[in-house]
Image (cartoon, rainbow, N blue to C red):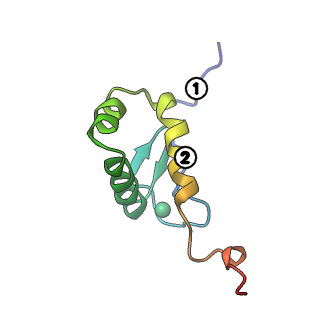
Amino acid sequence: MVSEPGDEMHDLTCLIKGCQAKVYAPAGTHSICREHFLNYLTWRRRKGPQMFMKYAGMTMEERDPLVAEWANTIRVEESPTASAPKT
Ligand SMILES: [Zn+2]
């Protein structure tokens, strides 16, 4: 058995790459800042009430793929590579 590092958080900043905000709430086994937490909440709500209820019954590990899916929809403004070429 692998011993866990206890309840020590290894993510001190937001899960979203490029976001330097302090963590506010857990998202799966990771943590996200308040702004992104609200964003995540909205994203889940958009998926409908069934998703909302299903999510409530999921374990942290089960939530991870969902968090990853949501994280892909997040664009951090600071990212210089994200600028779309104009034609
Ligand atoms: Zn964030």
Please, which residue is most extreme toward the bottom here?
87
Q: Give the SS element for disc 1.
A: loop
Mark 1: few/some/many CA within 10 Å (<14, 14-19, 20+): few
- Give amino acid for label 1: Glu
Front residue (pair 12, 29): 29
The three-letter amino acid code for the residue at tag 2 is Glu
In the image, what residue occupies the spot 39% across and 53% down?
A: 43
Q: Position of residue 51 (x, y in %)?
A: 34, 37
Q: Which mark is residue 42?
A: none
| SS for dot 2 | helix
Q: Which mark is residue 4?
A: 1
Q: Which residue is mark 2?
A: 69
The residue nearer to you, when weighing 58 against 19, is 58
Quadrant the C terminus occupies: bottom right
Q: Nearer the viewer, residue 40 or 13?
A: 40
Q: Position of residue 8 (x, y in %)?
A: 51, 39
Residue at 72% across, 75% down:
81
| Up-down relation of residue 49 to residue 23 (above or below) | above
Residue 16: quadrant of the picture: bottom right
How many numbered discs, if any? 2
Which label's residue is closer to the chain start, 2 or 1?
Answer: 1
